[in-house]
Amino acid sequence: MSSATQPSENAQPFKILSLDDGGVGGLSSLLILENIMENIQKTEGLDKTPRPCERFDLIGGTGTGGIVAIMLGRLERNDGKSTVDTCQHENEKFLHKQCVNTVVLATTKVDINAAPILFRTYQATTGWSECKIWEVARATSAMANLFKPIKLGRDNEKFMNSSFGHSNPCKILIKEATTLLSDQQEMLILSIGTGFGGPIEMGNTKRSIRESPASVYYLPFRENSKFIGRQDILSKLDDMLFTQAGFQQVALVGLGGMGKTQVALKFVCMVKVKYTDYSVFWVTAASMDGFRNSCKELTAALNIEASDSEDPRRLVKNYLDADKCGKWLLILDNVDDTSLFNAAAKEDRISSYLPQSEQGRVMITTRSKKVAWLAVEDDNLELGEMSSDDLTSMLIRGVKGLSDDLHDQNKALINEILNELCRLPLAIAQAADYMAVKQISIAEYLELLRESNEDKIDLLKYSHMDIMHPEISQSAVATTWLITFQQIRKSSPDAVNLLRFIAKVEPKAIPQTMLPGSDKKKSLVDAIGILLDYGFISRRKEPKMFDMHSLVHLTTQLWFKGLKDEEKYMHTVVMGK
């Protein structure tokens, strides 16, 4: 038996109070609990309303529920009123074995996929035993899109809200209770949610369970266990797709190598945990042929009967639009070709085959801002740079043994690698993979990276296939951009000529007046627009000045070295013909 507060004698059940996260909806939890306590008072004929800490052996929660758990458990309050004005204990330690057993959930920013960290009043946890009450409250309530994480403990770990995947902490608390209750003791749990967004119609529960469609998951990839960070993006995707009723859609847009597919995969894995009534389907749509083939594979996986003459794209749309399909999330990955949306023939447009069921959610990943706008207009989310901490963690996790000796020299070298690779997630992941496979040090990799531009490009072209899990292996970052170059070459000769010129000049602070074709304003504006669209160049604050990503610049040089008309182009520029 733990040294924690003992449950009542005579084999009384071990009673647990579990409190969900839910923002301002947490007020409903307090109102429900207040009503329960008042009913106990009436039933037992008590002079006053009992406090929850007198009736439960374990009180726990996360987010808003975590704050309520602190008030009712650690502070042993009767309700949540006037806490800000009257609480004089916020600077006291959270650890306090004389109060009712209280647990508050949070998660580390480094690995949001890991099990939540439990802050306990009854047990000193290594590294966090000195945490104050206000610090624990801050950790459990630090939503990624609202508050910064808080550093706690001797190692200054960053903590944040754990509600993504654990908004209902009931299972965690049941597991925790097994370490506290005595042999043969039964367990009772009261789990209080934070409300439902609309009216609930009561029907035949058994029949509805029998008739409700089982969730189906069609994912060509498995979860990437090395995924790090992006909690803010994941939370925004959740808000954009699941906070409102009806059909919702969003596009995740970013430069090739930013990790869009990996973010989508992580989001899908979270949806499977948080929204268990949703099926998830993953379709690749880099081209119309690829989309058709991916739909054909999906129809086979779903056992949809079809003749050879039936269009699998239409079959998938009809399947998802049917009420019997239930709720679903559809991922359209790598939708980078604008012709999929503005083709002259309707049957060549991908929009003709996208379901519109009120039960559906659609998420698109694309490198093209134009595709994002054509697909969802303003409902898009740009994937920017990762933080230094997350990129460092990605590198450490990928290189075995590095975390065992992360002294100041290694920290400096890691920062140099991040800067050399322009903080691009896929390039950082490739670097970690290369060092692990070749068994070289950070200093040795950095030396290779700086040897010459050709060596740097060769490293950017490196892609190691995971033999055990080939489905999660990623294309090299240089290969990713070369595919985009081919798409640009197919759609705009003017943009190709512009790329060709920029590859020969310094990639920073490029004035528009020096670009070829300045005498043809519309053609130049269109060409610049295409390069901006794919993220290959960006506007500076100064008017009509541009930068090109330095790694894109190197890869562009590689691409043009392989084109047969390079000498002809250079002769034209020099001679002015």
Image (cartoon, rainbow, N blue to C red):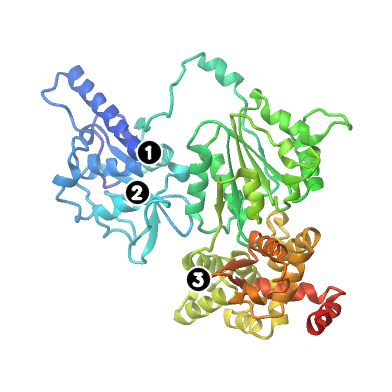
In the structure shown, which secondary structural element does the residue marked by tag 3 occupy?
A: helix
Q: Nearer the viewer, residue 310 or 134?
A: 310
Classify mark 1: residues with Cα within 10 Å, few (<14), some (14-19) or many (20+): many
The residue pinned by badge 3 equals 403
The residue pinned by badge 2 equals 141
Asked if residue 453 shows in the view, the reply is yes
In the structure shown, which secondary structural element does the residue marked by tag 1 occupy?
A: loop
Tell me the distance, in whole angstroms, between the alpha carbons under discs 3 and 2. 29 Å
User: N-terminal of the two: label 3 or label 1?
Assistant: 1
In the structure shown, which secondary structural element does the residue marked by tag 2 occupy?
A: loop
Identify which amino acid the numbered label 1 is placed on.
Gly
Asked if disc 3 and disc 1 are in contact, CB closer than 8 Å, the reply is no
Q: Is residue 254 above or below residue 76?
A: below
Q: Residue at x 61, y 55 (%)?
A: 260
Q: Is residue 28 above or below residue 417?
A: above
Residue 166 lies, in percent from the top left, at 44, 42
The residue pinned by badge 1 equals 22
Identify which amino acid the numbered label 2 is placed on.
Ser
| 49 horizontally vs 188: left or right | left
Q: Nearer the viewer, residue 415 or 422?
A: 422
Identify which amino acid the numbered label 3 is placed on.
Ser
User: N-terminal of the two: label 1 or label 2?
Assistant: 1
Q: Is residue 426 above or below residue 502?
A: above
Tell me the distance, in whole angstroms, between the alpha carbons under discs 1 and 2. 10 Å
Q: What is the number of callouts on the image?
A: 3
